[in-house]
């Protein structure tokens, strides 16, 4: 039988080694890196709400999303709705093209979108934009694209950027069935890469179950029981804190740039300033 050309017992894929040495160090900054267990999990909403929380407390808040796909074209330019939302939440003086230096129309992983559109990902442009964004800020909120293992370029993934920024990691997770596995896998990947995990935010939690999550399993039905038990399971099995449980509200909209009051209230209960400095939440 021929030898396996990729012997998993002896070989480690270079990407999974999380070696940061091929890329330059980024400027030290105070802030948070918001990632998610999956795409469309609500990273942008949570990142924006955190930015708004800090801005309302008088901080000069920088926001940064290195690359966005699925952008719309406005007067010949690609525009990211996520960048517009983040900029509005932070009251940012930077343009959306500075906040998100690499933009693609195709709703695909960035490296795939870049190949299809014939516009390679410019990592140097990303690094330069990050340096400019954090230069005059008190705190920076970085939002990744997809999950930690989403490729920005073939060799450079979101997890590499998180490592280069050295910011505490906030993981946004779903509320329902399956989220324990997705969240623990994300936490494992983060810790394997040497990232510091600040904690988990559970997003789109059913509002009618919020009163029950601390008080016991009072709702019948497997789906409800899963949602009620998931926060404790994530905290216990993931050895991390659940920083916020954010309700699912129809008024939350990245496109309309709106954050519902109860969502902002849920975010406001955490001391993000302390977490951004590498401390514990209050």
Image (cartoon, rainbow, N blue to C red):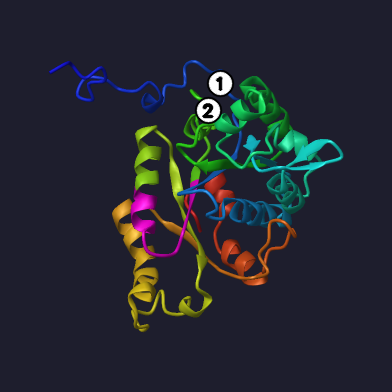
Q: Nearer the viewer, residue 38 or 54?
A: 38
Q: CA distance from mark 1 to mark 2?
A: 6 Å
Asked if labels 2 and 1 touch by Cβ distance under 8 angstroms, the answer is yes
Q: Is residue 74 above or below residue 48?
A: above
Answer with left or right where residue 266 lies relative to residue 74. left
User: Which quadrant is the N terminus positioned in?
Assistant: top left
Is the residue marked by circle 2 packed among few (<14), some (14-19), or many (20+) residues within 10 Å?
Answer: some
**Place of residue 145 in the rendered image (x, y in percent of width and height, measured from the top left):** 57, 41
**Place of residue 185 in the rendered image (x, y in percent of width and height, measured from the top left):** 35, 46
Residue tagged 2:
164
- Classify mark 1: helix, strand or loop: loop
Residue 117 picture quarter: top right
- Classify mark 2: helix, strand or loop: helix
**Place of residue 275 in the rendered image (x, y in percent of width and height, measured from the top left):** 53, 48
Question: For the magenta stretch, what is the residue range?
Answer: 170-184
Answer with left or right where residue 173 lies relative to residue 99. left
Within the magenta stretch, is there residue 179? yes
Is the residue marked by circle 1 packed among few (<14), some (14-19), or many (20+) residues within 10 Å?
Answer: few
Within the magenta stretch, is there residue 243? no
| Dot label at residue 25 | 1
Task: Identify the residue at horizontal 36%, vertical 24% (top origin).
Answer: 17
Task: Identify the residue at horizontal 69%, vertical 56% (top origin).
Answer: 254
**Residue, far right:** 75
**Place of residue 65 in the rendered image (x, y in percent of width and height, measured from the top left):** 64, 39
């Amino acid at each position: 039988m021929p030898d396996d050309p990729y012997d998993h017992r002896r070989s480690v894929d270079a990407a999974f080694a999380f070696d940061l040495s091929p890329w330059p160090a980024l400027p030290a900054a105070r802030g948070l890196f918001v990632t998610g267990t999956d795409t469309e999990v609500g990273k942008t909403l949570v990142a924006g709400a955190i930015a708004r929380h800090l801005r309302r407390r008088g901080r000069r808040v920088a926001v940064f999303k290195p690359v966005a796909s699925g952008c719309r074209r406005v007067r010949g330019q690609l525009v990211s709705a996520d960048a517009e939302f983040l900029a509005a939440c932070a009251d940012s003086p930077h343009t959306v093209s500075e906040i998100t230096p690499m933009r693609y129309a195709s709703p695909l992983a960035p490296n795939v979108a870049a190949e299809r559109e014939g516009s390679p990902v410019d990592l140097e442009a990303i690094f330069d934009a990050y340096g400019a964004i954090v230069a005059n800020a008190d705190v920076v909120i970085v939002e990744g694209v997809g999950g930690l293992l989403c490729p920005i370029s073939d060799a450079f993934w979101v997890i590499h950027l998180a490592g280069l920024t050295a910011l505490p990691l906030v993981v946004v997770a779903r509320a329902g069935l399956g989220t324990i596995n997705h969240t623990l896998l994300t936490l494992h990947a983060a810790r394997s890469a040497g990232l510091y995990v600040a904690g988990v935010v559970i997003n789109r939690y059913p509002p009618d179950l919020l009163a029950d999550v601390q008080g016991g399993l009072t709702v019948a039905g497997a789906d409800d029981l899963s949602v009620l038990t998931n926060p404790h399971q994530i905290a216990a099995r993931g050895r991390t804190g659940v920083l916020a449980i954010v309700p699912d509200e129809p008024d939350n909209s990245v496109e309309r740039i709106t954050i519902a009051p109860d969502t902002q209230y849920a975010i406001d209960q955490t001391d993000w300033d302390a977490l951004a400095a590498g401390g514990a939440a209050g």
